[in-house]
Amino acid sequence: MIQLLKLRERFFRFVGRYEFYVMAAVRFVIAFAAFSLINSVTGYMDVLSDYPIVLVFALISSFLPAGMMMFLGAVLILLQFYALSAVLCLITAIIFIILFCVYLRFSDRKGLYTVLTPVLGVLGIPYVMPVASGLFAEPYAVISVVCGEVAYFILKRVSAGSALFSASNDTSTTSTVTFAVTEILADQEMYLYLAAFVISAVAVYCVRRLPVDQAHMASVVVGTVIQFAIIGGGEIFFGNTQELIRILIGCAVSLVIMLFLAFMMRSLDYSRVERVQFEDDEYYYYVKAVPKASVRPEDRQVKHIHSSHTRGKKNPRGKKARAEDSRRSGEESLEEQVMREFRE
């Protein structure tokens, strides 16, 4: 535990010292992964599928707010869909405009949550984001996760039915619109995931605010179990029992990730709880103060003593001074030993 706390302190000190470059690197990695995902799932326009385009978009996103990353991702998706079907591109554009309006009006402007949700969905662990939104933000931050999950299911449905969308260009526009709306908006699995994410995020937020010990860790477990119960039950209802193993593994991996993040960001020392009581003219106050778990960072200083400067010089203080110096050095070494034992 002490070693993990030391590692955490060093990590945050490093991030605090190089915050601008670290955040730019994080945004670049997330943007590059998201844009590469879009091209790998679609790939209908060869010009956009080349890696130089992805690198340029990722570089632009690394130095701009997360909203620009979302905008560039939406533009990339629409251009890829346009190469497949113009009607599909138009319908997706309308859906994206609605999502952007909802995001700008109701969400907590967590653009990285929106971008990370489809990326983690491809990896099979989208269950991380609802728990993270309830643990580290306000409940309405889950709207950002919902927008990202809708984009993920649009990519998933279009990729699965790309041949049908391509063939629908030869039919009437009305038939193409009906087919696109049915494929995208009538997906019951998408609504199942959205409901599970919203309920899980609200439950995590409510549990983490309870005045009990280890509330943050308990909220992570509760949120993950709720997602598994709702999504697993829904898949059984839809007859997709083969999906239960995948969902169970994804929830287990997400649980481990979120427990680690909760320890790094919300670790508290319940052995040093303080309860304070005071009053003013109108109220009595009963406060429970739980300090954050931390260790004092080691501050090592190395002093270089050059013997050439002191060689040939006599100590004017004599034997008594030398004895006093040796006694002090003995005391310092004893103190260092005590501190070393305490740290271990």
Image: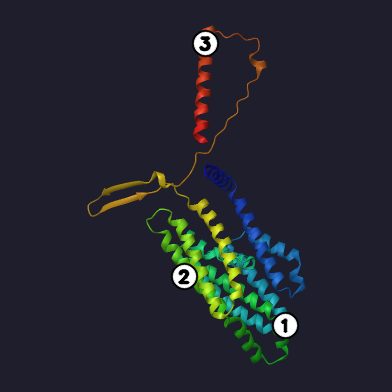
Sequence order check: which comes first, mark 3 or mark 1?
1
For badge 2, the amino acid type reads Ile
Question: Alpha-carbon distance for marks 3 and 2?
Answer: 74 Å
Q: Nearer the viewer, mark 3 or mark 1?
A: 1
Q: Secondary structure at mark 1?
A: helix
Q: Which residue is mark 1?
A: 163
Residue 253 vertical position relative to residue 264 in the rendered view, above or below: below
Any part of residue 104 in sight: no
Left or right, residue 259 beside residue 213: right
- At x 65%, y 91%, the residue is 175
Point out residue 328 in the picture as x, y percentages from the top left corner. Answer: 50, 18
Q: Which residue is mark 2?
A: 199
Q: Nearer the viewer, mark 3 or mark 2?
A: 2
For badge 3, the amino acid type reads Ala
- At x 42%, y 61%, the residue is 207
- At x 76%, y 71%, the residue is 47
For badge 1, the amino acid type reads Ala
Q: Which residue is mark 3?
A: 321
